[in-house]
Image (spheres, grey):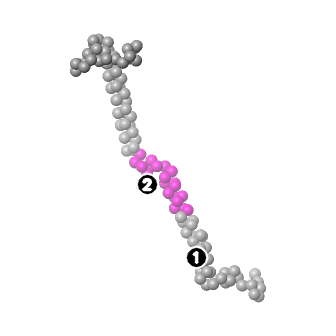
Amino acid sequence: YEQLEGCPPAVFVFTFCATGMMIFGWLVSVLVYPIIYHGLLSIGVMLDNTLGTDFIDFPGTWYQHVMKAECKGFRTSIDAFSSWQSSARQSGARQSGVRSSGVRNELSPMHKAE
């Protein structure tokens, strides 16, 4: 590489401050951006499996037990409602239309057809 007379390298065309800013910008783009990118990729990998064993993950076992208890509760309430509904139908056929509280159990016109 030969330097021609009257043609200085591009870095020396600008002032010292401008050259320093260009070199600083180059260092940031070469060194800092890859570090930030690598950090974001690492966070993405950790968040990929949210029920794993990393320190950032959700407590998977606790979540499993809570959901099992919720499903059991729903099943218990459905069973209780079904047994209440069947007992209400059986007792409704035997009663004369008066509840134990003394209030008359009037059926709506829509329910009378059943």
Type of amino acid under label 2? Ile
Across and down, in percent, residue 55 comes to: 42, 55
Residue hosting label 1: 24
Give the residue drawn at x 35%, y 33%. Answer: 73
Give the mark nearer the N terminus: 1 vs 2: 1
Res 1 → quadrant = bottom right
Across and down, in percent, residue 19 comes to: 62, 81
Vertical order, 46 against 20 (above or below): above
Instruction: Mark yes or no: residue 87 visible.
Output: no
Res 104 → quadrant = top left
Vertical order, 6 against 57 (above or below): below
Magenta span has 21? Answer: no
Q: 7 or 50, which is in the foreground?
A: 7
Instruction: Mark yes or no: residue 19 visible.
Output: yes
Left-right relation of 21 to 65: right
Q: Secondary structure at mark 1?
A: helix
Q: 104 or 26, which is in the foreground?
A: 104
Give the residue drawn at x 59%, y 82%. Answer: 17
Region of the chain picked out in magenta, as a range: 37-60
Q: Secondary structure at mark 2?
A: loop
Give the residue drawn at x 46%, y 49%. Answer: 50
Q: Nearer the viewer, mark 1 or mark 2?
A: 1
Residue hosting label 2: 56
Vertical order, 28 against 75 (above or below): below
Give the residue drawn at x 61%, y 73%. Answer: 26
Q: 86 or 52, which is in the foreground?
A: 86
Mark 2: few/some/many CA within 10 Å (<14, 14-19, 20+): few
Res 16 → quadrant = bottom right
| Residue most extreme to the front | 109
